[in-house]
Image (tube, coloured by chain):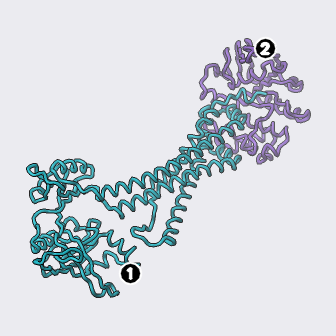
């Protein structure tokens, strides 16, 4: 599913010069794996996730995801890749405020290059997968933290992605809710979905089939 | 992209309804003032052009030069000169004109459309070829049938307007139309004057004139009669009945007029363009006033565009994370650019339609108020406005253009949203 070789990424750190976050990190993930990436804060976990998902393009190295070579891919093709191949789940949910859960789940359809059939049915099915069918009309403000994250997961699942990329998905949740979300990830993984999650949390680490540590810009 | 941006546009605008309405309203004010003032300018311009100074743009009025150049020619308009004028390039037809050179008065005592009238007037008369006014003749043929028959006469449209709006109300006389006047017969004594002495040998030439229509081409302070009648009266009064006092040259096209004017001047003749110049001056005054107000309106639209730029900049900044998520779920840079521009387009369309509607309502309201509250005066129009379709479409288009222009930079900023940066943490 993922074949990333020698990824290097640095940032302009003002007066301090360049700050190297990824320094030749390489990673291979097979189809159906559930990989947890751990590491200290600022170690570059989120950066690595953004590179793998085609959100960050300012890196060196070679990244192939689901057969698509991402480095050097032009924006329209990269956008299509994000729309069809990967789903993102963020720590802060990033739902559109004042908009129903259903409309949030439908967001990828607004930018889809290919017909997706009955969008409403598809979004309802995605909500059903996360157990929120009855909450379709609610806005994020009317949902609990766990429910918001599940809406975000439903949004990520809407396009039937091959890969789910999760950035501290339980970081903003209480323990019980985090357990529910982790259980949901396990279910999705058991159904064949490849998951890569960066996390600090033991519960997510223990749910993964493989754990990698990012340190000094390299994975081990 | 097969996905529709409309739901996102609708959601975005409805979430920030107050700001959207404020931006659209600012645009509407600019568009409304522009459409209103341009509509007013067009309307007043048309009144000036068509009613106050009705100038045929393809007509050149040639008169004899004030100074004769002897061997070089010029000075008089005889048949030979008229023939040369008619042969000028770009001239379709030459219409001869001859003033009745004898003075003339009308003394009317009798019924005037239901009112007793006792009036004596010194009048002028000019003879013209029938074809020059035939389109305005409502009764019979415009020909002179001899001294025993009434002379067909055309009155000036402008004179009738001044009579109806100024003279008649003050003297409690009836309002008249061209059709009502047609057939009216009144006495005219040529070779007689209230204001100048006539030679003792000159005997009055009693005649009758019958109005057969009104025309923009009619003499303003007098009557327009057939050329043969003018020639006959001048002959009877022992005055010049051979040379003409003017020739109206009909150009094949208004674009030929400058060339004709130049050719006429090289012949030692003069072009009487007083009416044209007055029309042009009045038209220019209207155009300048309208342009000033239109410029002010465009400035308002510009301000509205800046307001939209500011509002959209703030909106794009506030929606940074949302735009980042859109990028994450598959929005391309161009999709985000289009998204913001379509939002602006909807606002602009709304502002443009609202502004144009406001301008229409305002102009109709002003027309109604003018009819109701303004006193009657010559050339008072039924409407002060012209509302051509292009102006209404232009108003809507300006609203859209201003909004899209204002949102251009914010849209570009939205398209450059770096999802990795805004979604980090």
Q: Colour of chain B?
A: cyan
Q: CA distance from mark 2 to mark 1?
A: 107 Å
**In this orientation, which residue lies closer to the viewer: B378 or B303?**
B378
Q: Is residue A82 left or right of residue B351?
A: right
Q: Is residue A113 visible?
A: no
Q: Is residue B91 left or right of residue A6?
A: left
What residue lies at 79% left-to-right and 14% top-to-bottom?
A219
**In this orientation, which residue lies closer to the viewer: A109 or B153?**
B153
Q: Quadrant of residue B222?
A: bottom left
Give the secondary structure at mark 1.
helix
Q: Position of residue B367 (x, y in %)?
A: 49, 66
Label number found at residue A219: 2
Q: Position of residue B342 (x, y in %)?
A: 59, 42
- Disc 1 marks which residue? B171
Q: Colour of chain A?
A: purple
- Closer mark to the observer between disc 2 and disc 1: 1
Q: Is residue A112 left or right of residue B157?
A: right
- Residue B421, compared with residue B318, is above or below; it is above
Q: Is residue B241 left or right of residue A219?
A: left
Label number found at residue A164: none
Split into 4 quadrants, where in the image is the N terminus of chain B?
top right
């Amino acid at each position: 599913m993922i074949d990333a070789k020698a990824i290097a990424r640095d940032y302009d750190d003002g007066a301090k010069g360049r700050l190297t976050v990824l320094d030749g990190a390489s990673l291979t993930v097979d189809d159906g794996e559930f990989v947890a990436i751990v590491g200290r804060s600022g170690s570059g976990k989120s950066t690595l996730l953004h590179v793998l998902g085609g959100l960050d393009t300012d890196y060196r190295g070679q990244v192939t995801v689901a057969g698509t070579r991402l480095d050097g891919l032009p924006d329209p093709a990269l956008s299509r890749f994000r729309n069809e191949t990967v789903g993102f789940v963020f720590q802060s949910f990033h739902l559109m405020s004042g908009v129903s859960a259903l409309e949030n789940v439908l967001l990828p359809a607004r930018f889809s290059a290919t017909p997706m059939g009955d969008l409403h049915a598809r979004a309802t099915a995605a909500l059903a997968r996360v157990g929120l069918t009855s909450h379709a009309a609610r806005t994020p403000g009317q949902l609990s933290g766990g429910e918001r994250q599940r809406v975000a997961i439903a949004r990520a699942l809407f396009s039937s992605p091959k890969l789910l990329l999760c950035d501290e998905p339980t970081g903003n949740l209480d323990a019980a809710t985090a357990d529910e979300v982790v259980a949901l990830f396990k279910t999705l993984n058991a159904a064949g979905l490849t998951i890569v999650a960066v996390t600090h949390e033991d519960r997510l680490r223990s749910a993964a089939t493989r754990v990698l540590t990012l340190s000094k810009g390299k994975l081990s | 992209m097969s996905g529709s941006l409309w739901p996102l546009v609708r959601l975005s605008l409805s979430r920030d309804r107050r700001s959207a309405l404020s931006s659209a309203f600012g645009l509407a004010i600019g568009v409304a003032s522009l459409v209103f003032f341009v509509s007013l300018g067009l309307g007043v311009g048309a009144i000036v052009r068509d009613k106050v100074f009705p100038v045929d743009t393809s007509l050149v009025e040639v008169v004899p030069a004030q100074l004769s150049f002897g061997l070089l020619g010029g000075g008089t308009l005889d048949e030979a000169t008229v023939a040369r004028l008619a042969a000028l390039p770009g001239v379709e037809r030459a219409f001869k004109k001859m003033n009745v050179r004898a003075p003339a008065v009308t003394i009317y005592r009798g019924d005037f459309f239901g009112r007793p009238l006792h009036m004596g007037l010194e009048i002028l008369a000019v003879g013209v070829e029938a074809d020059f006014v035939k389109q305005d003749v409502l009764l019979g043929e415009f020909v002179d049938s001899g001294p025993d028959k009434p002379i067909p006469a055309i009155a000036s449209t402008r004179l009738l307007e001044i009579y109806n709006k100024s003279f008649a109300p003050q003297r409690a006389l009836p309002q008249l139309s061209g059709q009502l006047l047609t057939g009216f017969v009144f006495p005219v004594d040529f070779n007689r004057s209230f204001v100048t002495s006539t030679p003792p040998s000159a005997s009055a030439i009693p005649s009758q004139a019958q109005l057969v229509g009104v025309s923009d081409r009619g003499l303003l302070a007098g009557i327009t009669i057939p050329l043969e009648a003018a020639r006959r009266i001048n002959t009877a009064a022992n005055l010049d009945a051979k040379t003409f006092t003017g020739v109206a040259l009909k150009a094949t096209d208004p674009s030929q007029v400058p060339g004709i004017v130049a050719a006429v001047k090289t012949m030692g003749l003069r072009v009487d363009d007083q009416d044209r110049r007055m029309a042009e001056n009045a038209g220019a005054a209207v155009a300048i006033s309208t342009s000033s107000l239109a410029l002010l309106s465009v400035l308002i639209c510009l301000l509205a565009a800046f307001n939209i730029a500011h509002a959209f900049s703030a909106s794009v900044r506030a929606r940074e994370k949302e735009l980042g998520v859109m990028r994450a779920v598959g929005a391309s840079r161009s999709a985000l650019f289009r998204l913001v521009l379509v939002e602006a387009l909807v606002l602009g369309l709304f502002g443009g339609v609202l502004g144009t509607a406001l301008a229409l309502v305002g102009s109709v309201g002003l027309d109604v108020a003018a009819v109701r509250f303004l006193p009657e005066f010559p050339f008072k129009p039924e409407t002060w406005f012209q509302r051509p379709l292009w102006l209404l479409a232009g108003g809507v288009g300006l609203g859209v253009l201003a909004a899209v222009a204002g949102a251009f930079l914010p849209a570009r900023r939205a398209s450059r949203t770096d999802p990795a940066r805004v979604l980090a943490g």
